[in-house]
Image (cartoon, helix red, strand yellow):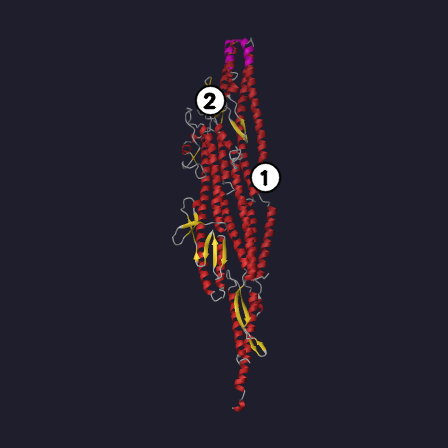
Amino acid sequence: MRVTNNVLINNLKRNLGNNLRSLDLYQNQLSTGKLINKPSDDPVGIVDSLRLRNKLNENKQFQSNTSDAQSWLESTNDALGSLTDVLNRVYELTIYSANGTFEDQERKALSDEIGQLIEEVGSIANSTHGGRYIFGGSNTLNKPYESGAWTNANTDSIKYEISVGVTIPINITAQDVFIDNDMIGTLQEIYNHMQSGDTLSLSSTDLGKLQTNIDQVLSCLAQVGARVNRLEMTNERLLEQEVNFTKLQSSVEDIDIAKTLLQLKNQESVYQSSLSVGAHIIMPTLMDFLN
Amino acid sequence: MSSTFFGLNIGIKALQAQQRALDVTSHNIANANTQGYSRQDVIMETTVPIKTREGYIGTGVDVKEIRRIRDQFVDTQIRTENKVLGEWETKSDLLSKVEMIINEPSDNSLSSIMDQYWESWQQLSKNPESAAARGVVVQSGVNMADTFAQIDRMLSELQADINSGINSTVAEINSISKQIADLNEQIVKAEMDGAKANDLRDKRDLLVEQLSELIPLDAVEDQYGAITITAGGATLVSSSYVGSMIFTDDGSDPTQARLEWINKYTGNTIGPVNITGGKLKGYLDMRDEEIAGIKDELSTLAAKIAEEVNALHSAGSGLNNTTGIEPGLDFFVKKDVTKPFGADNITVNQTIIDDLNCIAASTASPVIEGDSSNALAIAQLKNKLTMNPTLTGDNRATFDDYYNSIVAQLGIDAREAERMYDNQTLLVDQLLNRRESVSGVSLDEEMANMIKYQHSYTAAARVINTMDEMLDLIVNRLGLVGR
């Protein structure tokens, strides 16, 4: 092949351009730290990259949902705990007053405490979490219990989504805790029987009913505990997933810095040698030897 | 017996021929870097010998031809490959612009913004009573609708830019055709006596080559030296005739702008220009298929999101629905009610923007403030199989899947275009080198030739000198005896 000066120069120009482009690629990768800066950098990887981004966002949301659900359930747990304490106190008082040796006067004194405890149950029924009545079903803005009556019969469960398509109910309704076994009614009866000194009813039916109510609260507590456990497990799983997704995303999107640096150095030396070749191309022609 | 001055005559011819050769060498050196220039060679031949008694005697040298060194086959190949180069160069350039518009992966891309939208419904599902959570739903909805509209607008603007690109390309084609026709005329006139108009031909070949990058063409040279160029299904140049194309763009719908042949005398359009390659095909494919396709797909996505969200939202209850008779509203509405939902035709219902209580987080009617089952159902649309990319069978894709596949397809197309452009550049560069190796000027060669011709010139001058001395001897010094 006949080679002219322009053939050499054209080739040099093209190769310099190619080398410079590779340099640009590696420098771009190093400065952004990313292998994928636009879809065409890796059309297959971009799908994973986008999917993992979606998943990570979703994961973050689910983590926030579980922790919100946990804090709601903790409020419920506290309320139910206090309720158990109250009912146990009532139980103690009922056993005391069922004792026939008590004076009516003493029994009345005890019944005053029962009266206070009934108020306490009412205020527990109106417990709030972030301004919302936790036993109000989905009707969170209306008090479940007001001046001795149940004012909110809503029994809907409030559900949070904790992973794709999986929801968990976070509330226990007043129906479950208080109304099903007529807790207030039981307490009221105990109060009345104490007032009237009806020790027989106190020791037989009232204690039985009270026990049913206590069992009811305990079973609700157990439910809350089970849900909290489930949420803790879910949360752990979500945290593990987050680590995995982040790792995967990094393997798809991020550069291997050591490798890329080496490639850059390599490319730099290629570029420099092509520049020095360029210096040689402008070499002496026949003209230099003619005189 | 030859005449006394015969030898002198040979010497003069030699001087003239070497001088002409030196001129050509000089011309070659001068044009070593001229685009499209082919080196020229002086072809010398002996003049007709004369018969003497002793046999034929040479009568000297003459320049027969100044030949342009050119390989027509390489030219044809370059033209063929140039049209592919032009097509992919345009596509690669435009696709990288589309990639910039889509802007994936990034934290401000449509993908992230859709995520934010579904997240806002999740947040609302946890706090349906909260005005702040409602505000976030509206804001992220507005943001998503705006992003769809913005991407769509930028793609439309790119289509309009393509049209102005086509317009200037058409102007370039028309101008080059005119120049080729002018050169045709000049070449035919110049070559009437049989000599080749080398430099004019170089110019014309260069123009044809430039044209071949814009539109695929066939060039045939006739016996008089004029070339006929057919392109786009009609005659573009024939001798001194120039066909003309016109690009009509009324600025309304960029994909409706047409490229047509025009009758120069009547001004009427004759028919569409048939584009099978070149820069024009790159432009048209991008405008009518790639970009229009992405716009369609984004519109399908936006419309489906609007449809699914509206179906749930309008069946739910806002906080105003205290009586159970307040009808649910559509969350997304059309900007232009006469057209279907699309990426450019989606916005959040102004009533909802004005009154956040209209957001229907509840399914109960009359509304229960703490009920967020509808918000949760809407949030769960994110992972519902709502899209059907293949248009057959069941829905198999979520909104995200569908969008991701749009991005992946764009990536694949952009990568292919880039690769094709690189390969084609390499191929054309190699062909150009091949031609350079045939037609290019080598300074070393020219220098060598220069010395060669210079020496011959000197030698011929020396011959004349010798003849002169001989004549001097005969005329001035012979016969002194008789003086």
Mark seen at residue A248: 1
Q: Position of residue A22 (x, y in %)?
A: 57, 51
Q: Which quadrant is home to the C terminus of chain A? A: bottom right
Q: Chain of mark 1?
A: A
Disc 1 residue type? Leu
Q: Residues within 10 Å of mark 1 (few under 14, many from 20)?
A: some
Label 2 vs label 1: CA separation?
A: 48 Å
SS type, badge 1: helix
Judge by depth and name the residue closer to the eye, B134 or B314: B314
Q: Would you identify the image quadrant in which residue A9 lies?
A: bottom right
Q: Earlier in the sequence, mark 2 or mark 1?
A: 2
Segment colored magenta: A187-209
**Residue B315 drawn in magenta:** no
For this orientation, the residue located farthest to the bottom is B482
Judge by depth and name the residue closer to the eye, B451 or A52: B451
Question: Is residue A18 in view?
Answer: yes
Q: Position of residue A20 (x, y in %)?
A: 55, 53
Mark seen at residue A143: 2
Q: Give the overall secondary structure of the magenta segment.
A: helix
Q: Chain of mark 2?
A: A
Disc 2 residue type? Lys
**Image depth: mark 2 or mark 1 in front:** 1
Q: Would you identify the image quadrant in which residue B59 lies?
A: bottom right
Q: Would you identify the image quadrant in which residue A245 lies?
A: top right
